[in-house]
């Protein structure tokens, strides 16, 4: 009889082969077949990037979690690899939840993930504990001693019911990891652990916690140094909107920026910001590239709306495109990975003073990288500027800038959806040095919008038929603009 892992590998190879390439986005990773959520184990190992993902191969809904696996050398073209983990031991029988990967000094690849384990008779009596698997990049052997971080290593108040998503790294001859938990006061906490061998762990400290703000349970932490700052990424559940509208309610991802004293293992939080202002972004993970870039991918969905989302394919769920992170003026900023430029074709450049409506020759499509720079300083009488995309007589998604309020409105309510889910987002959008820059990357139904070179980013899915590929621009009052359009292929 085939084991659970063999069964999944046979199934995904057969079903995945039946999905035509043009049934998927061009460069946004989708599951080989079935369901995908969080990115897992994003790493660089033996000359390639590996990205694993939360995976249920047998249906397009969430189910007992496996780890899917894909590889790439350019962060754009992905090759599927055999399913890496299946829930097939006592320690993870109820699911192999999120985790991360790190190459070992002796050349193996180590996975640290959350094993969900039955601890009582009722189906919901489960613990979440951290498990280890080691392998060659394709096949992984689970440690016989799993879980390697058990409930006995939780600090006072920590809960094994919510204890998950370890992020592991190797530093100064030892392994470190951060793990999320929820304490008795319903506060998400980020715990730091240390180990000489990734098997024997000790609890060091709590790095940060909700403190009554920014949601409750904090999922999927990541922790790294960047441009002189320390960054802690967390994805909170049950956030409240902030009065200034910066943080939207529900599931979100926030970046906590601050300073880190390594010796004392003390993180001092200095600033907090949303990582993405869109409707579809959660649980990001980062990798350090060989050339020193910190690159992030996230699940391009939202738990609050996944059940409403149409099932049009034999796969469900996508990753964002990989994005380069940097800190500028105290903010975590993002731009598309520079590899995206290798997909540029048919570059078009327009300069115009627009007053009214315009369509520019050749500026259209559903696979494109479009940058519109508005010379706001030279357009004092522009009262409103609107860009519509994925447009035809019945469909459109709008991005609208209001100079009076320095606000950008994203509106996908006309995209073709029949679901009453969130379709609007508002974000602050002030010109920088007199200019406002909007970069839109569209890959089928995946839209990623970068404002002012990545100062703010918005990710959203558009449920729009592929034939709706128009782009139009509208200005109330003269707007001086510069437009660069690349087709992506
Ligand atoms: C986040 C998450 C993780 C968990 C995984 C389960 O999206 O809830 O906390 O490990 O998904 O699939």
Image (cartoon, helix red, strand yellow):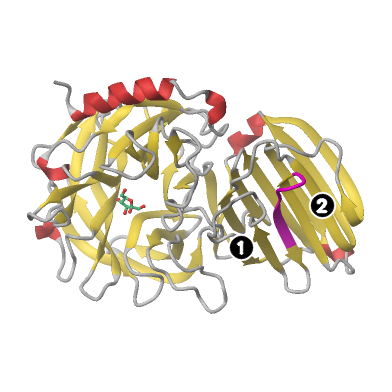
SS at mark 1?
strand
Q: Give the residue at x 28% y 55%.
A: 178
Residue 51, visible in the rendered structure: no
- Quadrant of image for the C terminus: top right
Query: Is residue 153 or residue 396 the one in the foreground?
Result: 396
Q: Position of residue 109 (x, y in %)?
A: 27, 32
Q: Answer above or below: position of 126 versus 64.
A: below
Q: Where is residue 258 in the image (x, y as percent from the top left)?
A: 43, 66
Q: Answer above or below: position of 191 versus 469.
A: below
Q: Give the magenta part as a residue range.
A: 392-400
Apparent side of residue 258 relative to residue 365 in the rendered image (left or right)? left
Please give the residue where the numbered disc 1 appears in the rendered image: 424
Query: Is residue 280 or residue 306 the one in the foreground?
Result: 306
Q: Where is residue 346 in the image (x, y as percent from the top left)?
A: 77, 30
The verdict on residue 394 being magenta is yes
User: Which numbered disc, 2 or 1, marks the residue that appears first in the sequence?
Assistant: 1
The verdict on residue 211 being magenta is no
Residue 6, located in which quarter of the rendered image? top left
**Given this view, does label 2 or label 1 mark the residue nearer the observer?**
1
Please give the residue where the numbered disc 2 appears in the rendered image: 473
Q: Distance between the residues labelled 2 and 1?
A: 19 Å
Residue 80, located in which quarter of the rendered image? top left
């Amino acid at each position: 009889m085939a084991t659970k892992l063999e069964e999944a590998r046979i199934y995904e190879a057969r079903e995945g082969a039946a999905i035509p390439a043009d049934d998927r986005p061009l460069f946004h990773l989708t599951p080989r077949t079935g369901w995908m959520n969080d990115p897992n184990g994003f790493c660089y190992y033996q000359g390639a990037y590996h990205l694993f993902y939360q995976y249920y191969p047998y249906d397009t809904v969430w189910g007992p979690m496996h780890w899917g696996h894909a590889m790439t050398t350019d962060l754009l073209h992905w090759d599927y690899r055999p399913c890496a983990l299946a829930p097939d031991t006592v320690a993870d029988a109820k699911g192999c939840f999120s985790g991360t990967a790190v190459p070992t000094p002796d050349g193996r690849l180590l996975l640290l993930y959350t094993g969900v384990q039955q601890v009582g008779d009722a189906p919901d009596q489960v613990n979440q504990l951290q498990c280890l698997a080691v392998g060659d990049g394709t096949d992984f052997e689970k440690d016989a001693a799993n879980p390697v971080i058990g409930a006995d290593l939780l600090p006072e108040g920590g809960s094994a019911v919510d204890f998950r998503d370890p992020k592991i790294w190797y530093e100064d001859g030892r392994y470190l990891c951060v793990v999320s938990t929820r304490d008795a006061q319903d506060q998400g906490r980020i715990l730091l652990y240390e180990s000489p061998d990734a098997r024997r762990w000790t609890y060091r400290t709590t790095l940060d916690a909700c403190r009554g703000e920014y949601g409750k349970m904090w999922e999927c932490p990541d922790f790294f140094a960047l441009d002189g700052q320390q960054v802690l990424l967390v994805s909170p559940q049950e956030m409240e909107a902030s009065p200034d509208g910066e943080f939207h309610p529900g599931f979100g991802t926030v970046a906590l920026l601050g300073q880190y004293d390594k010796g004392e293992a003390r993180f001092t939080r200095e600033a907090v910001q949303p990582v993405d202002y869109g409707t579809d972004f959660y649980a990001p993970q980062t990798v350090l590239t060989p050339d020193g870039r910190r690159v992030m991918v996230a699940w391009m969905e939202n738990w609050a709306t996944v059940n409403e989302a149409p099932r049009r394919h034999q796969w469900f769920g996508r990753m964002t495109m990989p994005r380069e992170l940097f800190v500028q003026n105290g903010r975590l900023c993002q731009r598309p990975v520079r590899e995206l430029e290798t997909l540029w074709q048919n570059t078009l450049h327009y300069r115009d003073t627009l007053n009214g409506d315009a369509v520019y020759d050749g500026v259209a499509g559903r696979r494109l990288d479009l940058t519109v720079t508005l010379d706001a300083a030279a357009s004092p009488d522009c009262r409103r500027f609107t860009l519509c995309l994925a447009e035809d007589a019945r469909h459109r998604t709008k991005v609208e800038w209001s100079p009076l309020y320095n606000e950008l409105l994203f509106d996908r309510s006309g995209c073709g959806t029949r679901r009453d889910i969130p379709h609007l987002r508002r974000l602050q959008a002030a010109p920088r040095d007199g200019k406002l820059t909007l970069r839109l990357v569209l890959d089928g139904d995946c839209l990623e919008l970068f404002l002012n070179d990545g100062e703010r980013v918005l990710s959203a899915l558009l449920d729009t038929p592929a034939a709706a590929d128009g782009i139009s621009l509208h200005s109330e009052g003269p707007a001086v603009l510069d437009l660069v359009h690349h087709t992506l292929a």
